[in-house]
Image (cartoon, rainbow, N blue to C red):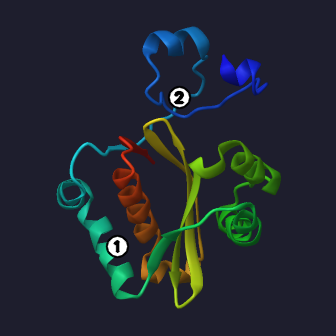
């Protein structure tokens, strides 16, 4: 109701149930074209997640990134979205032949979400290799966009930023990481 009345949002598209109680979901939302979602529960110590939940291939990728000097960090602002994220986003979507969201879309997300919008980055030798954009909603982190330089894949930056984002989410007390 808040989104409809106060923020004047008429339509909201969500992928997955996002922990909404079935009686509320059925009463207020129309299910269309349902998608499957991948959710990591952050209900155990990070060390246990790393060794018992995260796939061996991902652990190998993270270790490869570290061995290659890849550093993961979080940074998000209007300037970062405009100058760093969006150009890499356009290149990434062009590679897949997918039409992109507009720059205005990402800036509006930043305006609406503020510090709940996060971008984790991978860099090596001061060169940005990849970025992972997501946002916090209640007890959940939802990631929505990954961007990367195809030439940098050999350094496994995507694995590094996923793991950095998961570590941050766990440290901040979030309960779920929604891929």
On the image, numbered disc 2 is attached to which residue? 34
Q: Residue at x 32, y 66 (%)?
A: 58
Query: Residue 113: percent from the left, percent from the top?
Result: 65, 44
**Residue 24 seen in render:** yes
Using the image as rendered, state which of residue 5 and residue 133 is in the foreground.
Answer: 5
Closer to us: mark 1 or mark 2? 1
Q: What quarter of the picture does the N terminus occupy?
A: top right
Q: Does residue 36 lie above or below 134 as drawn?
A: above
Query: Residue 86: percent from the left, percent from the top?
Result: 73, 65
Tell me the number on the disc at residue 3: none
Query: Residue 72: percent from the left, percent from the top?
Result: 46, 73
Q: Residue at x 41, y 68 (%)?
A: 159
Q: Residue at x 71, y 63 (%)?
A: 81
Q: Does residue 39 lie above or below 69 as drawn?
A: above
Q: In the picture provided, is 112 more to the left or to the right than 37?
A: right
Q: Does residue 54 lie above or below 58 as drawn?
A: above
**Residue 101 seen in render:** no
Residue 69 falls in image quadrant: bottom left
Query: Do labels 1 and 2 touch, CB within 8 Å?
Result: no
Using the image as rendered, state which of residue 97 and residue 91 is in the foreground.
Answer: 91
Query: Residue 173: percent from the left, percent from the top?
Result: 36, 46
Q: Does residue 1 lie above or below 87 as drawn?
A: above
Numbered disc 2: secondary structure:
loop
Q: In the picture provided, is 45 more to the left or to the right than 159?
A: left
Numbered disc 1: secondary structure:
helix
Using the image as rendered, state which of residue 150 and residue 41 is in the foreground.
Answer: 41
Q: Residue at x 38, y 63 (%)?
A: 163
Tell me the number on the disc at residue 62: 1
Q: In the picture provided, is 5 more to the left or to the right than 167?
A: right
């Amino acid at each position: 109701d808040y989104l409809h009345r106060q923020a004047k949002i008429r339509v909201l598209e969500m992928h997955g149930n996002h922990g909404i109680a079935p009686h509320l979901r059925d009463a207020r939302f129309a299910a269309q074209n349902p998608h499957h979602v991948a959710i990591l529960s952050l209900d155990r110590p990070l060390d246990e997640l790393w060794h018992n939940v995260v796939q061996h291939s991902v652990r190998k990728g993270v270790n490869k990134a570290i061995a290659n000097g890849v550093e993961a960090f979080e940074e998000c602002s209007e300037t970062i979205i405009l100058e760093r994220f969006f150009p890499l986003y356009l290149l990434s979507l062009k590679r897949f032949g997918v039409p992109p969201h507009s720059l205005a879309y990402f800036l509006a997300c930043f305006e609406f979400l503020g510090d709940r919008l996060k971008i984790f980055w991978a860099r090596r030798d001061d060169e940005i290799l990849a970025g992972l954009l997501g946002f916090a909603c209640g007890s959940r982190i939802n990631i929505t966009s990954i961007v990367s330089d195809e030439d940098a894949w050999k350094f496994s930056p995507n694995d590094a930023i996923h793991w950095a984002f998961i570590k941050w989410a766990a440290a901040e007390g979030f309960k779920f990481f929604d891929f």
